Image: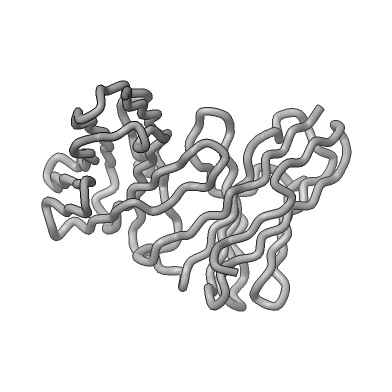
């Protein structure tokens, strides 16, 4: 596709359930990022994938969060045993490479609501 | 030292006015400073970016001013329009993938 695609666009689930969020980056982009945006807040870095290198997971807030990227393309962010504080917009971005000087292109995010 | 402080939190201007959004940083190793525009329900979109070797960059009605000695940079929107109403984020990086984002400025341009 032309841009970064995320699904679902909205997800409502009960506390304690697991959720999976999907990101399809721009074709040819080797770098992929996940961010979390809470209401009225900035963007909180979660995880970064670059090619076949080990991902940088330093931003994941707890061991309930995990992510994988299969075949260097599609990525899935999984949140286990969801808590109400996990409610936020989860944004995915991709860039041509992993240098800071290449711009990151964002999807429209998944709005996650935990009841 | 990794923070980027953005102000103001919100801003209201009349159509045609020149809103100014400011960001300040501490880490002198930062070498790339992008600005992003975000409309409700959409992801952030890159607006304009600057490197510390220039003091000003213009793209259309958007201008970044950069003050290396003060470790500050700002976004100016000339002849602002109601369609510019959005949230604006500054960011900084130091040649790596990790952007440090400001907390955002919600701009409203009145018709």
Residue A72 visible in the displayed image: yes
Q: Closest to the observer: A5 or B95? A: A5
Answer with the quarter of the image where residue B50 lies: bottom left
**Image check: B106 left or right of B21?**
right
Q: Residue at x 29, y 57 (%)?
A: B32
**Image check: B74 left or right of B40?**
left
User: Which scheme is used to colour this image of the protein?
Assistant: one colour
Question: Residue A47: x and y, percent?
Answer: 60, 56
Q: Residue at x 73, y 59 (%)?
A: A76
Q: Closest to the observer: A77 or B56? A: B56
Question: Residue A28: x and y, percent?
Answer: 54, 78
Quarter of the image that includes the C terminus of chain A: top right
Q: Closest to the observer: B93 or B49? A: B49
B69 to A22, vertically: above or below: above
Quarter of the image that includes the N terminus of chain A: bottom right
Answer with the quarter of the image where residue B6 lies: top left
Q: Residue at x 26, y 37 (%)?
A: B24
Residue A58 visible in the displayed image: no
Question: Residue B98: x and y, percent?
Answer: 45, 56
Answer with the quarter of the image where residue A34 lies: bottom right
Question: Residue B17: x and y, percent?
Answer: 19, 28
């Amino acid at each position: 596709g032309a841009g970064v695609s995320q699904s679902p666009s909205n997800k409502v689930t009960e506390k304690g359930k697991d959720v999976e969020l999907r990101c399809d980056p721009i074709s040819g982009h080797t770098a992929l990022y996940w961010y979390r945006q809470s209401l009225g807040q900035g963007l909180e870095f979660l995880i970064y994938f670059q090619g076949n290198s080990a991902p940088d997971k330093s931003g994941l807030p707890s061991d309930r969060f995990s992510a994988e990227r299969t075949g260097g393309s599609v990525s899935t962010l999984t949140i286990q045993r969801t808590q109400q504080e996990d409610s936020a917009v989860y944004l995915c971005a991709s860039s041509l490479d992993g240098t800071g000087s290449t711009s990151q292109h964002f999807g429209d995010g998944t709005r996650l609501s935990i009841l | 030292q990794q923070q980027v402080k953005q102000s103001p939190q919100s801003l209201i201007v009349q159509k045609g006015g020149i809103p100014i959004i400011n960001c300040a940083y501490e880490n002198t190793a930062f070498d790339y400073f992008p600005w992003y525009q975000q409309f409700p329900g959409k992801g952030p979109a890159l607006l304009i970016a600057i490197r510390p070797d220039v003091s000003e960059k213009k793209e259309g009605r958007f201008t970044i001013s950069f003050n290396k000695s003060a470790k500050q940079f700002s976004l100016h929107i000339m002849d602002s329009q109601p369609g510019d109403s959005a949230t604006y984020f500054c960011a900084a990086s130091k040649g790596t993938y990790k952007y440090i984002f400001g907390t955002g400025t919600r701009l409203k341009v009145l018709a």
